[in-house]
Image: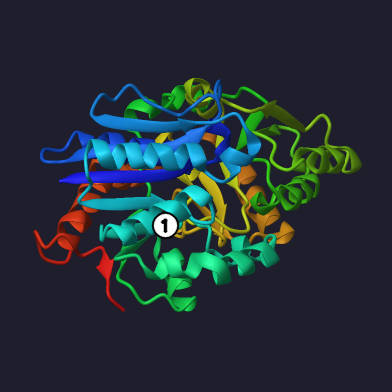
């Protein structure tokens, strides 16, 4: 079976899909009977999230001109090269809105190639409300037709699947979470290292610095608590200039000595940052998955996440807090976390690491491959595929 994956970009600062699409395609390529190609685009000199996995044939369209890149001309050429090199039995489109994803949907329809579309959170209510007029125009002009041309839609959680149904999309929906790479995570710190009396203790946020991440509410919650033994560390790339707003809030709230900005963290240093932390926080208004939560759990960290994320399992597995993305609820969760002794937090983190085993990439790739085989008539409908 020949499978072609398409993602708009592989720059490490473009968010979770730049990593998860690569990890998924790499893991699929290790499975017998699967040949995997990956198409994307970028500019010469851009860092790309590309692993050394030899089983994936990559076609990266490079273009330095803003207009040609904006129209996805380099990506279109790469897409046609990939199809000519190894004609796919199906195509897996990661993300929407971008010209490259739109072009891939058109090619799939013209060539009668089954298409999976994985919106990756771009159709979540908060995401649709952000710059909504552009998205309404795109939905009218082309995006709804692209979505309706898909054989199967892929959601990373039931919450995202419900949103797709709310939009009136009636195709089968496969609910398959993102994965986490346990080799990347390595072993978490030992109990004596995490339960020592060293201060300050570190609460970590690691994601893009973007308005949807809820950082301004987190800072207000942090300011409302007397927590001299804790420091809040923020890490991630600035997007759209939101870092300036975050820094202004830090100053206005008098948090200069209680909040640190670590900058953008590359993949090779991520593990070190997780290992130095005692608690992880993702206060987002909206996430289709939130792969950083899975990464934090895999490092043995207890997690505070919000109802804007699909992580209600934190409470079920007793490894964290799942709260509304408001100042009061974030402050309540933080207060509870601060009240626990290091040994209690360590035990929560250990339970979280067990929970994270559900998201190993081998399992995620097997579920994805089963959906591919079902589309091609090679097996019955997998349990992850919902028809209603």
157 displayed left or right of 213? left
Could you tell me if residue 338 is visible in this image? yes
Residue 6 place in picture, x, y as percent = 39, 45
Task: Identify the residue shown where x is 32% and y is 57%.
Answer: 108
Q: Quadrant of residue 113?
A: bottom left
> Which quarter of the picture shows residue 209?
top right
- Residue under the image location 41 percent in, 24 percent down: 190
Query: Horizontal and vertical percent for residue 150?
Result: 34, 65
In the image, residue 269 above or below residue 30 = above
**Which residue position holds label 1?**
313
Residue 304 in the image, given as x and y percentages of width and height: 56, 49
- Identify whether 113 is placed above or below 231: below
Q: Position of residue 97 (x, y in %)?
A: 54, 56
Residue at the image position 30 percent from the left and 47 percent from the top: 358
Q: Nearer the viewer, residue 198 or 79?
A: 79
Quarter of the image that includes the C terminus: bottom left
Q: Where on the picture, by quarter, is residue 228?
A: top right
Q: Is residue 122 above or below residue 213?
A: below
Which SS class for mark 1?
Answer: helix
Using the image as rendered, state which of residue 31 and residue 301 is in the foreground: 31
Going by the image, does 186 lie left or right of 42? left
Q: In this orientation, does residue 349 appear?
A: no
């Amino acid at each position: 079976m020949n499978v072609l994956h398409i993602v708009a970009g592989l720059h490490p600062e473009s968010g979770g899909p730049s990593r998860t699409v690569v990890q998924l395609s790499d893991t699929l390529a290790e499975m017998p009977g699967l040949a995997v190609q990956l198409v994307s685009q970028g500019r010469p000199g851009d860092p790309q999230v590309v692993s050394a996995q030899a089983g994936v044939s990559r076609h990266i369209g490079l273009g330095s001109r803003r207009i040609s890149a904006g129209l996805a001309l380099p990506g279109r050429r790469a897409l046609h090269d990939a199809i000519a090199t190894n004609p796919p039995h199906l195509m897996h489109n990661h993300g929407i809105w971008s010209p490259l994803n739109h072009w891939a949907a058109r090619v799939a329809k013209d060539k009668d190639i089954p298409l999976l579309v994985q919106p990756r959170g771009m159709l979540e209510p908060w995401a649709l409300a952000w710059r909504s007029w552009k998205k309404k125009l795109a939905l009218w002009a082309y995006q709804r037709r692209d979505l309706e041309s898909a054989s199967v839609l892929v959601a990373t959680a039931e919450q995202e699947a419900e949103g797709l149904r709310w939009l009136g999309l009636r195709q089968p929906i496969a609910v398959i979470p993102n994965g986490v790479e346990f080799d990347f995570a390595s072993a978490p710190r030992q109990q004596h290292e995490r339960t020592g009396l060293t201060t300050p203790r570190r609460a970590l946020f690691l994601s893009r610095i973007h308005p949807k991440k809820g950082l301004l509410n987190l800072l207000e919650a942090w300011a409302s608590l007397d927590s001299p033994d804790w420091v809040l560390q923020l890490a991630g790339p600035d997007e759209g200039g939101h870092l300036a707003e975050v820094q202004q809030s830090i100053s206005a709230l008098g948090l200069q000595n209680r909040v640190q900005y670590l900058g953008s963290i590359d993949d090779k240093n991520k593990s070190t940052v997780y290992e130095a932390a005692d608690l992880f926080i993702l206060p987002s208004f909206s996430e289709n998955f939130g792969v950083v939560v899975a990464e934090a759990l895999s490092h043995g960290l207890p997690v505070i996440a919000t109802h804007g994320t699909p992580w209600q399992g934190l409470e079920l597995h007793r490894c964290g807090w799942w709260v509304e993305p408001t100042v009061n609820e974030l402050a309540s969760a933080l207060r509870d976390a601060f009240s626990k002794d290091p040994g209690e937090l360590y035990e929560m983190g250990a339970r979280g690491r067990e929970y994270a085993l559900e998201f190993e990439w081998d399992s995620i790739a097997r579920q994805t491959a089963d959906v591919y085989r079902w589309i091609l008539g090679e097996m019955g409908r997998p349990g992850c595929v919902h028809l209603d």
